[in-house]
Amino acid sequence: MRHATRSRRFSRDTSHRLALFRNLVTALLKHGRIETTLAKAKELRSPAEKMITLGKRATLHARRQAFAVIEEESVVKRLFDEIAPAMKDRAGGYTRVTRIGYRPGDAAPMAVIELVTAEAVAAARGKGPDKGKAKGKAKDKGKEPPKEKEKSRGKGKAESKGKAKAKAKDKGKAKDKGKAKEK
């Protein structure tokens, strides 16, 4: 019976494979989404979700455990300050793997792995807790767009349609005149 068949080896020895996933986890948490092969994306889910779970604990020990895997201090800070608080209501499933086709060179299946609540993370990053996207949309629902813009857009379309119709009429008249001259 062959043991240790649960994880993929990627034709790398253990230290190289661990370094690969440290790099991938760091990139995923830094950018929110990365493009890689499907097999790597599927294997990346587990360590990435473990890091987010550590971020949700928000203790000094959890921060030190995250530093053991994540290579950049700024990414660990972002994990604990932005990403984990945005995921506090989720009980897992922090990442999404989407297939995007095949790589041209070797036809390897490619995928995008991204944080599920990327919108919530973006809202937490740039806008603060009381200026999130959902609240902003609710504020804009009752407002009507300015009427000046609608008028200017309408005139432009009407003018271009009117010009097109006028040209078509002129062409039709010219054809009629040509036929009349021939007779």
Image (cartoon, grey):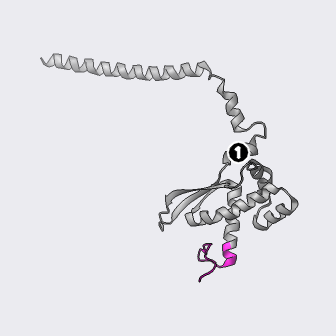
Would you identify the image quadrant in which residue 129 lies?
A: top right
Q: In the displayed orientation, state which residue is furthest to the right.
A: 60
Magenta stretch containing residue 16, yes or no? yes
How many numbered marks have been drawn onto this rendered protein structure?
1
Tell me the residue at 41%/22% (across/down): 161
Disc 1 residue type?
Ala
Q: Which residues are magenta?
A: 1-17
In the figure, 182 relative to 128: above or below? above
Q: Quadrant of the N terminus?
A: bottom right
Residue 127 lies, in percent from the top left, at 75, 40
Residue 74 lies, in percent from the top left, at 79, 57
Tell me the residue at 28%/22% (across/down): 171
Q: What residue sits right under mark 1 in the picture?
A: 120
**In the rendered view, does 64 fall on the left or right side of 103?**
right
Of residues 94 and 18, the one drawn nearer to the viewer in this rendering: 94
**In the rendered view, does 30 fall on the left or right side of 169?**
right
Of residues 181 and 175, the one drawn nearer to the viewer in this rendering: 175
Would you identify the image quadrant in which residue 160 lies?
A: top left
Tell me the residue at 66%/73% (across/down): 17
Q: Quadrant of the C terminus?
A: top left
Tell me the residue at 49%/58% (across/down): 101
